[in-house]
């Protein structure tokens, strides 16, 4: 197979596009895909400072690399989750990436805040992935607002989006379906725009990009992901993709263009305001403040019990 | 495991209901499931004569068996598709089932009409499953109207419905999603009501029912089904069901109760009328009449070429 662009021998084959690329043309193709997604979905302009949420994995570091190459003004934001060696290595890879390239990076350690994911899980018995999601959503908005960024970009790829869509569809989670978009505009002064510039790039493409660009990323999955339903959905979709290449892209694209507008005549915000942080909430407190209070209360009770 | 109803040793385990049944209680359970679906979805009343479309497989013969047991007035309708030995055996099993139980059965041979599925496929190059579907839809309506049946019942089970729903969702086929219901009311004087009383019964349950009732059915799949995408969808859903029993039922149920009403504000009929049969159509001819004409024209051309 030859490179679609320059006719040199292809080094990567993309079955869903029925095309092959050499190394340098693949990098060009991948960056252009991201650039087009940003422009077509109006994610952000070159004037806007972008906060890039980076975990240390191939997707988010690859995204940051692309945004730099495309000339955007970026700052990295890394949330160190406190999940043992996995988080230590994630943080190390992220810091090394930023240092080598002389890029600005904000790092927040949940352990320093008394909110390491394993602690929350142990104290509140909340599932780890749920607690982790609540932390990320809160700190992404909080840091962006504190530092004056209008937009947060995350490294969710096509496989992530397709698996999430499949999960939402299998349970017909209408509220979640309504919010599944590559661009989520802020609906409140304490939220910022969230964008997913890799939403059309497959996990395979993101891995090839990171490899071709020599990005040193953490390969291990989060230990909490083992057995997650998300992996079952990804496996289901991978089987389909093997039989009929391009299925994931059609699934996500057609949802966005055809089904989502029909499904969601109105985007409703939570009706209440959090008494602690004044963000929209479904109860007296928002999910973040509720989780923080519960963690703190239970920790104090344990300490009191230990002292007694 | 013990039978949920009578505490005798269970002979079948239903993981999605976390329950086991002995032979006779399973038969009771299965028949009651069908009875409830008929009543809840208002499929038909005991006063209505039901035309049961029977292929000779476990689902349709099992359905007919249940309807007889529940006391409904039924007549079988078997369309012999002309697909070689597979169709010969299907017809033989269906005729034997009806004869042994002294049940009324209408048999139509597509070969006698000059419309055997392999002939249509060969002459028009239409995919076999598409041609077969067009034939079935036409003859089910036609025979029901000719013989005065207000309703046609088919043996589609939960696995069929879930796989079809998944296929429609993966491509976001909005028109198809709108029509995916256990009861389809006629929208034209030349159509009758179509109902699927087994839509909540899994393929496994239908197989167990046929086995426990000693029904002699054709086990082979249609040879045209090999490699069909439908089987990929079934495989995907079986993997999910293995990890999380009950997923198929939730997927179909929640679609019907939550998503379908939101997806389909209006049920549109084809805008034109077929010049040949006066049924609703998307073109000058309906899909059935178009396929019949094409088959006839091409057959005549071939014969003329052979004579020349």
Image: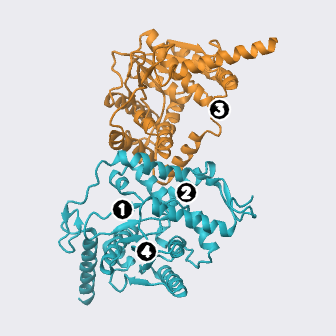
Chain colours: A cyan, B orange
Mark 4 nearby-residue class (10 Å; few <14, some 14–19, many ≥20): many
Residue nearer the viewer, B225 or A161:
A161
Q: Is residue B221 above or below residue B293?
A: below
Q: Numbered disc 2: what chain?
A: A
CA gap, disc 3 and disc 2: 27 Å
Residues behind callouts 2 and 4 on a single chain = yes
Mark 1 lies on residue: A184
> Which residue is pictured at 43% across the width and 59% down the height?
A41
CA gap, disc 2 and disc 4: 26 Å
Mark 1 nearby-residue class (10 Å; few <14, some 14–19, many ≥20): some
Percent x, y of residue B13: 47, 44
Q: Quadrant of residue B135?
A: top right
Instruction: Left or right? Give the position of B276 relative to B300.
Output: left
* Dots 2, 4 in contact, CB < 8 A: no
Residue nearer the viewer, A69 or B110:
A69
Residues behind callouts 2 and 1 on a single chain = yes
Q: Earlier in the sequence, mark 4 or mark 1?
A: 4
Mark 4 lies on residue: A53
Q: Numbered disc 3: what chain?
A: B
Mark 2 nearby-residue class (10 Å; few <14, some 14–19, many ≥20): some
Residue that lies at the very extreme toward the top in this rendered image: B147
Residues behind callouts 1 and 3 on a single chain = no
Which dot marks residue B224?
3
Q: Secondary structure at mark 3?
A: helix
Q: Earlier in the sequence, mark 2 or mark 1?
A: 1
Q: Earlier in the sequence, mark 2 or mark 4?
A: 4
Q: Secondary structure at mark 2?
A: helix
* Dots 3, 4 in contact, CB < 8 A: no
Mark 3 nearby-residue class (10 Å; few <14, some 14–19, many ≥20): few
Q: Quadrant of residue A141?
A: bottom left
């Amino acid at each position: 197979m030859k490179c679609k662009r320059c006719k040199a021998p292809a080094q990567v084959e993309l079955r869903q596009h029925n095309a092959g690329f050499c190394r340098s043309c693949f990098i060009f193709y991948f960056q252009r895909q991201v650039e087009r997604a940003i422009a077509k979905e109006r994610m952000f302009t070159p004037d806007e400072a972008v906060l890039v949420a980076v975990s240390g994995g191939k997707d988010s570091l690859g995204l940051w690399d692309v945004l730099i190459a495309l000339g955007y003004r970026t700052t990295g934001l890394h949330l160190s989750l406190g999940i043992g060696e996995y988080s230590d290595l994630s943080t190390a890879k992220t810091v090394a990436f930023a240092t080598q390239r002389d890029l600005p990076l904000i790092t927040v350690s949940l352990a320093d805040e008394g909110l390491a994911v394993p602690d929350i899980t142990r104290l509140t018995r909340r599932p780890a992935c749920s607690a982790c999601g609540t932390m990320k959503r809160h700190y992404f908005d909080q840091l962006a607002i504190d530092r004056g960024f209008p937009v947060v970009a995350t490294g969710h790829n096509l496989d992530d989006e397709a698996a999430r869509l499949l999960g939402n569809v299998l349970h017909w989670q209408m509220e979640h379906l309504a919010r599944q978009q590559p661009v989520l505009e802020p609906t409140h002064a304490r939220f910022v725009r969230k964008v997913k510039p890799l939403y059309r790039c497959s996990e395979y493409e993101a891995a090839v990009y990171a490899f071709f660009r020599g990005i040193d990323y953490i390969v291990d999955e989060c230990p909490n992901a083992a057995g997650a339903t998300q992996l079952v959905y990804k496996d289901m979709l991978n089987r389909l993709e093997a039989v009929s290449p391009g299925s994931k892209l059609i699934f996500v694209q057609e949802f966005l263009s055809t089904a989502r507008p029909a499904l969601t005549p109105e985007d409703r915000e939570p009706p209440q305001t959090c008494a602690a942080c004044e963000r929209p909430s479904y109860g007296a407190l928002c999910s973040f403040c509720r989780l923080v209070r519960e963690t703190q209360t239970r920790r104090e009770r344990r300490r009191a019990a230990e002292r007694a």
